[in-house]
Image (cartoon, rainbow, N blue to C red):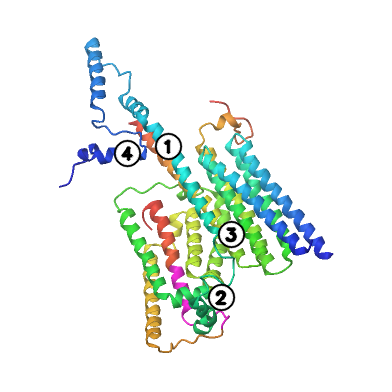
Amino acid sequence: MGEWIRFGFAAFLILCGLLAAGIAAFGLFKFRFALNRMHAAAMCDTLAILLVLSGLIVLSGFNFDSLKLFLIILLLWCASPVASHLLANLEVTVSPKLKDNCEILTDDGKEEEKV
Amino acid sequence: MSKIRKNYDTSFRTRFRRYILGETELPEVDYMPMYKKQIAEEKAEDERATEHYLMPPEVDPMEDAKRYAELSGMRWFRRLYGVMALLLCVAISGLLIYNVAFMPEFGSADTAMTNEVTERYIEKGQEETGVVNTVTGVILQYRGFDTFGETHVLFLATIAVMILLKRRKDEEPVRMDGENPGGDRILRTMAHFMVPLIFLFGLYILVNGHLSPGGGFSGGAVLGAGLILYSASFGFTATARFFNERIYDIVKVGSLMLYSLLIIYYLFTGANGIDSIVPLGKAGAIISSGLILPINILVGFEVACTMYAFFALFRKGGL
Amino acid sequence: MSLSQAYNILFGGAVGVLVLIMLCVLIRAVRGPEIVDRIVAVNMLGTLTIMIICILSLWLKQGYLLDVAIIYAMISFLAVVILTRIYLGVYHERMLKKEEERRG
């Protein structure tokens, strides 16, 4: 019975993770602007992988494999926000029609005047 | 006899190649003599009409030539090209997936893979080489000569890329965004944490090559990835503090020569039936299996140098 | 239904769903109008692949596959860093060239 409870909990976590990944993939097609799409994809990188891998950790119990899974979560949680930051940086630098899609604030928090 | 550039540009081969590649930017040559003649006549007429002042031409001849090329089938060719490429991809992947169905079941006894060679590797491999991971034993000892050649191919590839891409000292340097100080603070902070982790993991793969899957090639690739990440986040000048061209030469050539010496010793003793003086040790320990551990490490250094050299040469044309 | 059957259904279903999501993301990677879309889609493909590898390593009971997943995580991060760096460099170079042309 205990095994079944563990299985049920892990299955719940993994299914939640799959749902998050599916929503992220849906967001890639739903949004019109690249920064919004990036936001949706970044959710897959963090939330979905956390849920799926913690489900797997629950399944595998406490051993060397679960340590490695935890290391993967740690690595991705450190790396993928930085990757998103770099991508956003690239988009803001390169995109010619940035002002049509979002308002740009100055350092004081006021809206920049449209040129 | 060599052709001068103008002849080369007008040659049938170049025009055909440009047509196939879909380059719409046409060279300024006698592409459509009739058409150009017509434009020139119109221009002359305009000039005659204004007589003393040259009006800017209303029709840009290059623009018109582009439209002409597109109307004459280029557009259709491009669409057809896309469709055919997609069809080819789908066909090849379908064929491969179809072939998977004919593969024997994973681990079944009656396959072509379980012949006497495989049996020998599996039954005697650990005893003869002292390696727990049979794959490493096969690629570095039974098939050591093969791997020896592969490593030299890597060396030759780096030399070829160097010949093609290395910039001379008097050429202007490439402008690089990662080079300016205070560039990307978030990335640098992250790299402080990531780079040691990657190096540590690469060394783990290298040193554990005879115990677990991995070995010289994959461990070297991870080490090279760490070097590339370092130079991408801190800039090439920071990397040159510990990995400049001189150190690169020493590490690359030195590890290749040492590897050659070790493998020649192996081949000599193996071919003449002499017992190697290096003890095999207890299977499963880190320091065991004779010369395979140092060979793995040397191959790893070689691969890491190759990866970083490719990145640096393609990015800025020098180490 | 025994426990091992339940495990097979869970792992097989999860891998199947992840492959379907990957196909959707692949469409975005091919279509993506801007370079950022493509890089984002490729990054997401890498993350999904890591999930599949982890699930497979538990399903097939092969612990060493997790090493592959760790390397995959590192390399996909590295790919994003290098691509953005190189594209930014190319963009700045192009802008400089344009500036010089405008000045004459």
Question: Are the residues under badges 3 and 4 in a single subunit?
Answer: yes
Range of magenta residues: B283-301
**Label 2 to label 3: alpha-carbon separation:** 28 Å
Question: Are the residues under badges 2 and 4 in a single subunit?
Answer: yes
Q: Secondary structure at mark 2?
A: loop
Q: Mark 2 or mark 1, which has the lower sequence index? A: 1
Q: Mark 2 or mark 3, which has the lower sequence index? A: 3
| Residue B193: assigned label | 3
Can you give x and y, in whole percent of width and height, for residue B119 in the image?
A: 52, 78
Q: Is residue C1 left or right of residue B74?
A: right
Q: Nearer the viewer, mark 2 or mark 4?
A: 4
User: Which class describes the residues within 10 Å of circle 2: few (<14), some (14-19), or many (20+)?
Assistant: many
Can residue A43 be spotted in the picture?
Answer: yes
Q: Nearer the viewer, mark 3 or mark 4?
A: 4
Query: Which residue was labeled with disc 4?
Result: B18
User: Which class describes the residues within 10 Å of circle 1: few (<14), some (14-19), or many (20+)?
Assistant: few
Residue at 82%, 61% (x, y): give it. A5
**Relative depth, front residue between A1 and C97:** A1
* Residue B177 against residue B249 in the figure, above or below: above
**Label 2 to label 4: alpha-carbon separation:** 53 Å
Residue type marked 1: Leu
Query: Which residue was labeled with disc 2?
Result: B211
**Relative depth, front residue between C69 and B304:** C69
| Residue B80: assigned label | 1
Q: Nearer the viewer, mark 2 or mark 1?
A: 1
Which quadrant holds the N terminus of chain C? bottom right
